[in-house]
């Protein structure tokens, strides 16, 4: 479980700055981040709880998900 100290959503003036930045880029209101993810393919998985790394494409991988603000600064990574 990701603890709240790792998730830093923009608040106050920073939130307004990010909202305004996204609106200036695409004209869409009330956005505070964009999300994307990728898989890091593993040659070998840990022997302990190996099933946690097995994905539907029949290989082992770690999944990384990130959220960036209007200036492409990473604000959250899981």
Image (cartoon, rainbow, N blue to C red):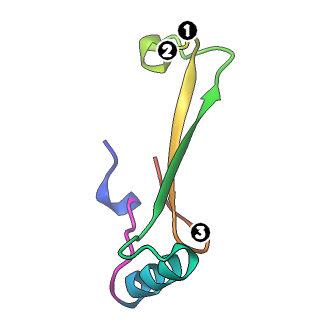
> Between 19 and 40, which is closer to the camera in this rendering?
19
Q: Residues within 10 Å of mark 3 (few under 14, many from 20)?
A: few
* First in residue order: circle 3 vs circle 2: 2
* Disc number for residue 7: none
- Distance of label 3 from label 2 (alpha carbons): 30 Å
Q: Are marks 1 and 2 in contact (CB under 8 Å)?
A: yes
Label 3: which secondary element = loop
Q: Which residue is mark 2?
A: 54
Q: Magenta region: which residues? A: 7-12
Q: Position of residue 51 (x, y in %)?
A: 43, 12
Secondary structure that dominates the magenta span: loop
Q: Are marks 1 and 3 in contact (CB under 8 Å)?
A: no
* Disc number for residue 73: 3
Label 1: which secondary element = loop
Left or right for 30, reference 22: left
Q: Is residue 62 above or below residue 10?
A: above
Q: Position of residue 67 (x, y in %)?
A: 49, 58
Q: Which residue is mark 1?
A: 58
Looking at the image, is mark 1 or mark 2 nearer the viewer? 1
Residue at (33%, 87%) from the top-left corner?
A: 12
- Distance of label 1 from label 2 (alpha carbons): 7 Å
Give residue 5's quadrant in the image.
Answer: bottom left
Q: Is residue 58 above or below residue 25?
A: above
Q: Position of residue 28 (x, y in %)?
A: 43, 73
Q: Is residue 52 magenta?
A: no
Q: Is residue 10 magenta?
A: yes
């Amino acid at each position: 479980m990701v603890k709240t100290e790792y998730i830093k959503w923009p608040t106050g003036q920073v939130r307004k700055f990010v909202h305004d930045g996204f609106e200036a880029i695409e004209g869409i209101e009330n956005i505070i981040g964009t999300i994307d993810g990728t898989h890091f393919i593993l040659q070998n998985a840990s022997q302990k709880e190996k099933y946690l790394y097995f994905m539907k494409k029949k290989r082992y991988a770690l999944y990384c998900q990130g959220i960036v603000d209007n200036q492409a600064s990473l604000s959250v990574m899981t």
